[in-house]
Image (tube, grey):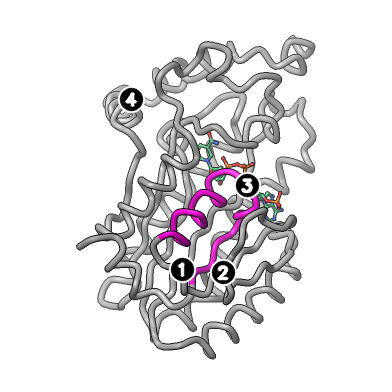
């Protein structure tokens, strides 16, 4: 079925982290094929793009449990009052932090767990009672970092492994209902991610991960295709798929050491200073 036809089923779309990068590209791509949908964005800053006449930006720090709970109440009311149709929830907000544990700021690591893990579980749990009677899709943006331990991005990789597995398992919990799940695993993507994670230069501009990087628009296009095909897990791009496949054939300890030697080379000043 064409994406245009498929997306007609959604009356409300809720996305976290639409103010930049992959989230912003997903909003742009959906607006092209479903301009009338109620597009709701949750992030701390306002997205620079028009959310549509029916759209609404909820300014919220999702690492704050109380703020998340209040936003979820407002969203539930919005779902209840919306025209008939399914709900698409995209759990996308997230950040990483590069360096040698525990040299980095522990508070930032804990906020990362709150945002990348707790907020995904909490928001989905709070909205599911409103989504279940209508049906819909819960998309969670994980990462290729979810497939093996990621030294120097130690906590980040673990949060992504959590949400990848959680999304797949949730899909089974919801079997027999009208709600599907999709875990999206992008490889290196050009966005604000690397700056926020403390990289001096994004890996793709250091000559690392050559040919693996994608634009956020490309990741959004893969995501929309996967939603319309009702897939439960995707790794974006054949090169990323090949790497995650071969990585998964190796003993975990070996793949951890390979991952360490690649990530160690990313030459963060902070990391060099810690040596
Ligand atoms: N870029 C990559 O290489 C890559 C690869 C694989 C997976 N991913 C994942 O893709 C997702 C999107 O990242 P991106 O690459 O698009 O990076 P990005 O451009 O930095 O976008 C991150 C988004 O998360 C939001 N966010 C951050 N902290 C937040 C908070 N406390 N509360 C609410 N929203 C918050 C940001 O909005 P505000 O700052 O306005 O709050 C922003 O919209 C993340 O989950 C990331 O882990 C990225």
- Nearest-to-viewer mark from 2 and 4: 2
Query: What residue is pinned by disc 4?
Result: 243
Label 2: state its secondary structure: loop
Image: 160 above or below 69: above
Q: Residue 148's quadrant in the figure?
A: top left
Q: Residue 68's quadrant in the figure?
A: bottom right
Residues marked 1 and 2 touching at CB (< 8 Å): yes
Label 4 vs 1, first from the N-terminus: 1
Magenta stretch prevailing secondary structure: helix
Query: What residue is pinned by disc 1?
Result: 35
Q: Sort mark 1 into few (<14), some (14-19) or many (20+) by Cα contacts within 10 Å.
A: some
Q: Is residue 236 left or right of residue 128?
A: left
Query: What residue is pinned by disc 2?
Result: 52
Query: What residue is pinned by disc 3?
Result: 20
Q: Provide the residue span drawn in magenta.
A: 13-32
Quadrant in which the C terminus is drawn: top right
């Amino acid at each position: 079925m064409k994406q245009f036809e498929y997306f007609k089923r959604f009356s409300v779309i809720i996305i976290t982290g639409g103010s930049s990068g992959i989230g912003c590209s997903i909003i742009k791509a959906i607006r092209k094929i479903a301009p009338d949908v109620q597009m709701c964005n949750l992030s701390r800053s306002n997205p620079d793009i028009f959310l549509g006449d029916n759209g609404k930006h909820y300014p919220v720090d999702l690492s704050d449990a109380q703020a998340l709970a209040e936003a979820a109440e407002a969203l539930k009311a919005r779902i209840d009052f919306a025209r008939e149709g399914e709900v698409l929830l995209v759990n996308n907000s997230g950040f990483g932090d590069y360096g040698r544990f525990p040299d980095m700021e522990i508070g930032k690591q804990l906020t990362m767990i709150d945002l990348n893990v707790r907020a995904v579980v909490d928001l989905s749990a709070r909205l599911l009672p409103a989504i279940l009677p209508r049906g819909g899709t819960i998309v969670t943006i994980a990462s290729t970092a979810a497939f093996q331990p990621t030294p120097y991005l130690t906590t980040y990789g673990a949060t992504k492994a959590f949400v990848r597995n959680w999304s797949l398992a949730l899909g089974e919990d919801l079997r027999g209902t009208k709600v599907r799940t999709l875990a999206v695993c992008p490889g290196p993507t050009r966005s604000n991610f690397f700056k926020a994670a403390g990289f001096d230069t994004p890996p793709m501009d250091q000559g690392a991960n050559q040919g693996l990087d994608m634009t956020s628009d490309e990741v959004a296009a893969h995501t929309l295709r996967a939603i319309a095909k009702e897939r439960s897990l995707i790794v974006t791009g054949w090169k990323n798929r090949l790497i995650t496949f071969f990585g998964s054939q190796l003993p975990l300890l070996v793949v951890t050491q390979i991952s360490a030697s690649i990530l160690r080379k990313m030459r963060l000043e902070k990391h060099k200073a810690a040596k």
